[in-house]
Amino acid sequence: LARSAVPAKTAYCITDNRIFFAAPGDYDKDGYFFGKLYSMDLDGQNKSEIACGADVCNSGLFMSDGEMLYFFGNSEKDGMGLYSCKLDGSGLTIGDKDEPRSMNFVAGKYIMATDAELYMKKDSTGWEMIDSGNIRFGKIVLVGDDIYYIDQNTKDPNSTPVVKRESMHGGPVETLG
């Protein structure tokens, strides 16, 4: 088994008084390190493996809304993509096959960004695209009901990236500078 000279990151989140995390670097696939899903008490005790049916990427998206875990993963059946499962590992589902660059929750709304598009979760059946462009680095920040991101005009190579603000409720996109 080949190992990378670069230490693997550990993806984790804390929810329900437990730390959920991906084992650091069990194997490397296409430049991504994957491992098993684990949880443990906040003091490091009672570590247990969570069988969810997918290997979890230990860098990138890994978060919970208190009921579900969301992570970039890989499974034999579906390959690499955005997965979710309940905190006990049950209910594994795959969403987008592209790796999301940023995802967050606010007031029951789920927002996800790739390098080119912003999505809002519409229901259990999928996501609705709410904006497209060149979302620089695919990173978003949620403040109240507003989504902030950096955008750049790819048709003009001399353009300067700008910060944009968009309401989760629709309406015009504002360029802030």
Image (cartoon, rainbow, N blue to C red):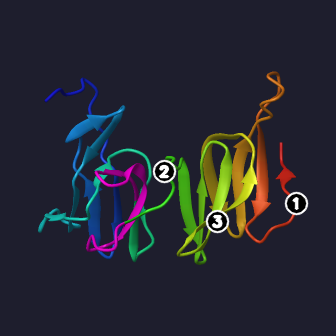
Task: Identify the residue shown where x is 13% and y is 30%.
Answer: 1
Mark 3, Cα crowd under 10 Å, few <14 / some 14-19 / many 20+, is: many
Q: Quadrant of the C terminus?
A: top right
Start-end of magenta stretch:
71-92
The picture places residue 19, in percent across and down from the top left corner, at: 27, 64
Asked which secondary structure carries label 2, the reply is loop
- In this figure, which residue is indicated by the disc labeled 1? 172
Vertical placement of 13 versus 25: above or below?
below
Using the rendered view, name the quadrant where residue 21 is placed.
Answer: bottom left
- Residue sitting at x 19%, y 42%: 26
- In the rendered image, residue 45, in percent from the top left (x then y), is placed at 12, 66
Residue 125 against residue 29 in the figure, above or below = below
Q: Amino acid at mark 3?
A: Met
Q: Quadrant of residue 52?
A: bottom left
The residue labelled by disc 3 is 120
SS category of the residue bearing label 1: loop
Distance between the alpha carbons at the discs numbered 2 and 1: 29 Å
Residue 97 tag number: 2
The residue at 28%/44% (across/down) is 34
Query: Is residue 84 found left or right of 28 in the rendered image?
Result: right
Q: Earlier in the sequence, mark 2 or mark 3?
A: 2
In percent of width and height, residue 87 lies at 31, 73
Q: Is residue 75 magenta?
A: yes
Residue at 40% over, 72% down: 68
Q: The disc labelled 2 sits on which kind of residue?
A: Lys
Among the two numbered marks 1 and 3 on one chain, the one whose residue lies closer to the N terminus: 3
